[in-house]
Amino acid sequence: METVCHKQLIFESLFSKEVVADFAGGRITSDAGGLLLRELDQRYRIAENAARCLHDPRDGHKVKHDLLTLVRQRLFAIARGYEDNNDAATLAKDPAFKIMAGKAPESDGDLASQPTLSRFENRVTAKDLRRLCDRLLELYLKTHPGPRKVIVLDMDGTDDPTHGRQQLSFFHGYYAEHMYHPLLVFDGRDGFPLAAVLRPGNTHSSRGALAVLKRLIQKLKQAYPKALILFWADAGFAVPALYSYLEDQPKTRYVIGFITNNRLLAETAPLLSKAQRQYQETGEKQRLFTSFSYQADSWDKPRRIIAKVEYTHLGANQLFVVTNLSRKPQFVYDDIYVLRGDVENRIKELKLDIKADRLSCHRFLPISSGYCSTLPPIACFGCCATTSRARNWLRLRSIPCGSSS
C-alpha cells in the first residue's frame, strides 16, 4: 500500500484563525537550554576573559573564526555534553550553538570544524594555562563578593586513566593503572572550582600542592582580609611543608588526614580496649575520640593528632587527623573533617557530567588545556550551591580563630 506523506494538515479554524500543522521542520535544535548558559556567560564574561588569556599567532587577515568565537564554541559544547571536538561536525550548523558563540543563526556562516578546534587547543602554552588559572580565581572573587567569615579550601587528587602513548602517562602503583594525576582545589562550602593542575601519572598526591596553595591563599587574603581560611585534605597531603606554611599564615587552620603507624596505635591502645569492652557489654557500635601531642622524627615540633577509635561487629577501626584547631576531638572529626568527603561529588561532576577525563590528545599541554576548559562551565553553570549543601556549612561559623596549644 502506498504511503501518503502530507507536508501540512489544516484543521478547523479557531476564533476565525486557521489552525495548520506543518511538518517542514525548518532549522531546529535540541540544545536551546544552552541559551540560558549564554546569559550567565554574558553576565560574568567567562569566555571573553578566557580568550584574553590565550595567545593567537594567526594572521588576522586570514582568520575566519576569531579566538573568542572558538572559546565560546568549545566551552558551550563542553557544558552541553559534547566533550569531543569531533562533535563539531554536527554542531557547526546548529542555530542554538551559533547564537551561543555570538553568531546569527541564519545569516552567519557555520562554526569552526573539528580540525580548526584541534589546532586551537594545540596552540596552548604553559603561560596560557597559568593565565587561565588566574582568571578562574578572579571569577571566584567576582561571584563571591563582600566580606567572608570562613573560606574552606578542599584539595584532592584523582586518577585519570590514559590511553595509548600520551605524553607523561605513567603507571601509578596505588591506582594500579597508567594515568594522569590531576590536582584539584574547590571551595569546600559551595563546590566552586578554584584550581586544577594536570600532573604526570607517577606523581605523589602532594606534589605541587604547596605552590598552588600559596598562590590561592595570598590572593584570598588580599580579597577577604578578615576571613578565616580552613584547609582540609586527605592523608596524601600530610607533609611537613604544608603544615609549616599553614601554621605561619595568620587566621589559617588545617585539618588533614594522617596515615596510621605503630606509635599512634600504641597511643590509642587503652582507648581501643575501652571501646572493645563497651561493645562486648552493649552489642552496639562504639565511637570514642581523643587527642594528643605527637612529633614525627622529620618534624621540627610536635603537633596535635585527633584519633577516632571505633569498634563494631567487624572489629576495630582507627583513623587519625593532624590539625591546629583547638576544638573538641569529636567536633573536629565529625563536624569538620568528615564533611570534606563531599569533594568526591564535585570530582564526579567533572568526570561524569563535564567529561573532564576525556583525554583525546597526545601532547600533555593540549590535554591540560582541555582539562582547564572544563572548569569554567562547571564554575559558572554550577556556582550556586544547593540549599542542602549550604546548610551543612552553617556549623563552620563556630570555628574559633585560636590554634591548639
Image (tube, rainbow, N blue to C red):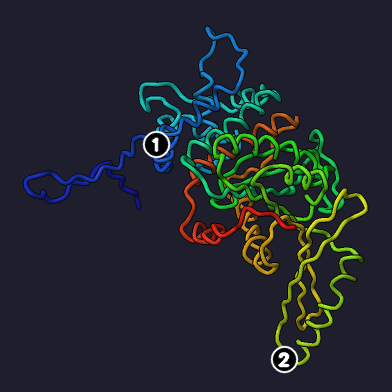
Q: Residue at x 87, y 51 (%)?
A: 173
Residue nearest the observer in this picture, 216 or 122? 216
The location of residue 265, given as percent across then percent down, is 87, 69
Whole-Å distance between the Cαs marked 2 and 1?
59 Å
Q: Which residue is mark 2?
A: 282
- Tell me if 70 is positioned left or right of 243 in this view: left
Q: Quarter of the image holding residue 302? A: bottom right
Q: Which residue is mark 1?
A: 39
Q: Residue at x 72, y 77 (%)?
A: 287
Q: Earlier in the sequence, mark 2 or mark 1?
A: 1
Q: Quarter of the image holding residue 319? A: bottom right
The location of residue 58, given as percent across then percent down, is 60, 12
Judge depth for marks 2 and 1 and give the one in front. Answer: 2
Give the amino acid type for the residue marked by disc 1 in the picture. Glu
- Tell me if 32 is positioned left or right of 352 in this view: left
Q: Could you tell me how many numbered marks the image carries?
A: 2
Label 2 Cα neighbours within 10 Å, binned few <14 / some 14-19 / many ≥20: few
Residue that extends furthest to the left in the rendered view of this protein: 16
Q: Residue at x 85, y 48 (%)?
A: 172
In the rendered image of this protein, does residue 78 appear above or below residue 393? above
- Tell me if 150 is positioned left or right of 260 in this view: left
Give the amino acid type for the residue marked by disc 2 in the picture. Thr
